[in-house]
Image (cartoon, rainbow, N blue to C red):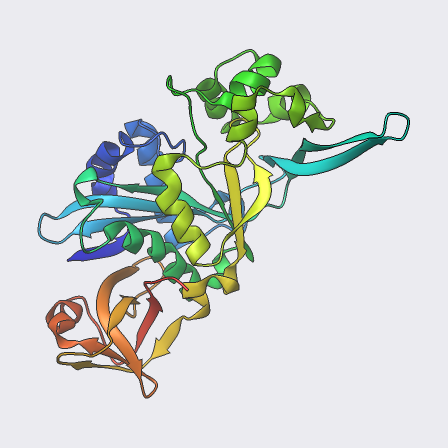
Amino acid sequence: MFLLRTVKESDLDDIFELSKLALFINLPRDRDKLKKKISIALRSFEKPSDDLSDNLYMFVAEDLETNHVVGTSLIHAQHGSVQSPHFYLRIGKEKKFSTTINTGFVHGTLKLGIDTDGPTEIGGLVLSEDYRKSEEKVGKQISFTRFLYMALFPDRFKDTIHSELLPPFDKDGNSPLWEALGKKFFNMDYHEADIISRKNKEFILNLFPSEVIYQTLLPAEARFAIGQVNENTKPVQKMLEGVGFQFSQEVDPFDGGPHYKCQRDEIYPIKHFYSGKFQFKKSLKDAKNYLVTLDKSADDFCAMRVSAAIEDDALIIDESYQNVLEKYGINGKIKAIPLFYR
């Protein structure tokens, strides 16, 4: 069984090991940077800043048998501010036609966009390789934990939720779009530019092309990568689409990875948030998986997966979960979201 909870300082070693499994900038392979992120998360849980862009929420999945953290997920309350804008490439089309030669074309286009009042961003989803094909579906649990927290504390987040997915990379781990476009304007490699952009984005605004870019001028490999999803990221894409996210026709300006968005209250598990009475029952029929949280404060959040069904305005939970839920302080009211798609 797994406990989904807010991060602790003592989780640093386990999270550092998990950071080696991904290339996410928001989960860097650097102990000092991870320690700082954990510190920001602890402050955000306890006393969030009025400036949402300063708030970061980190969740972990703890294996209760080994007491090790085996997965993480993050919420950045606002991605894109005046101090650190959110940049993207908007995908469009432009029709051209000549009556003289009776020939026309529809060109795919890219145009740099900027958002200084950005959406809430979810990311940082990393799971230990040993748990990726487990029957408990720990990856889905730690991913949906973010939606449960948003349902409990909606005022901490923006109305629009955003997620950036990794695109395909070539055999050497390079981004085809970066090699064809970004590298020509920034004179540095992809990973270096991505790291710098996390600290200061001025160079993007001043060096990146400000006019429409015709995709026809790009090599085929770069064109085909725009808006596509890395093979290893397709399970995340499936999850996002299953709960209501859609491709926003915006991509990362560096690598062309797709951006997905959904209105917070339209995300399936949030839309079907349950708060009310519950009871335990033996041998439930037609039970499904739910993520339930105990009646805790915003900075002491924890949740668990249970088999349950809603009957007569109550959440009926399989009694095999009774002991462990009572151990973590369950009382007369429970809050839950469905741990399944539409």
Quarter of the rendering containing residue 314: bottom left
Quarter of the rendering containing residue 125: top left
Q: Residue extending furthest front?
A: 102
Q: Is 78 situated left or right of 110 in this image?
A: left
Question: x, y (%) of residue 289?
Answer: 26, 66
Question: x, y (%) of residue 189?
Answer: 48, 15
Q: Is 205 situated left or right of 126 in this image?
A: right
Q: Is 258 situated left or right of 98 in this image?
A: left
Q: Residue at x 38, y 62 (%)?
A: 341
Q: Residue at x 61, y 24 (%)?
A: 204
Asked whether residue 255 is in view, the answer is: yes
The residue lying toward the viewer, choosing from 124 and 257, is 257
What is the tally of numbered marks visible in this picture? 0
Residue 239 higher or lower than 290, as above or below:
above
Q: Residue at x 28, y 48 (%)?
A: 7
Residue 280 higher or lower than 204, as above or below:
below
The residue lying toward the viewer, choosing from 83 and 214, is 214
Q: Residue at x 41, y 34 (%)?
A: 230
Question: x, y (%) of residue 298?
Answer: 36, 61
Quarter the C terminus occupies: bottom left
Residue 98 higher or lower than 266, as above or below:
above
Quarter the N terminus occupies: bottom left
Q: Residue extending furthest bottom?
A: 312
Q: Is 204 situated left or right of 280 in this image?
A: right
The residue lying toward the viewer, choosing from 328 and 24, is 24
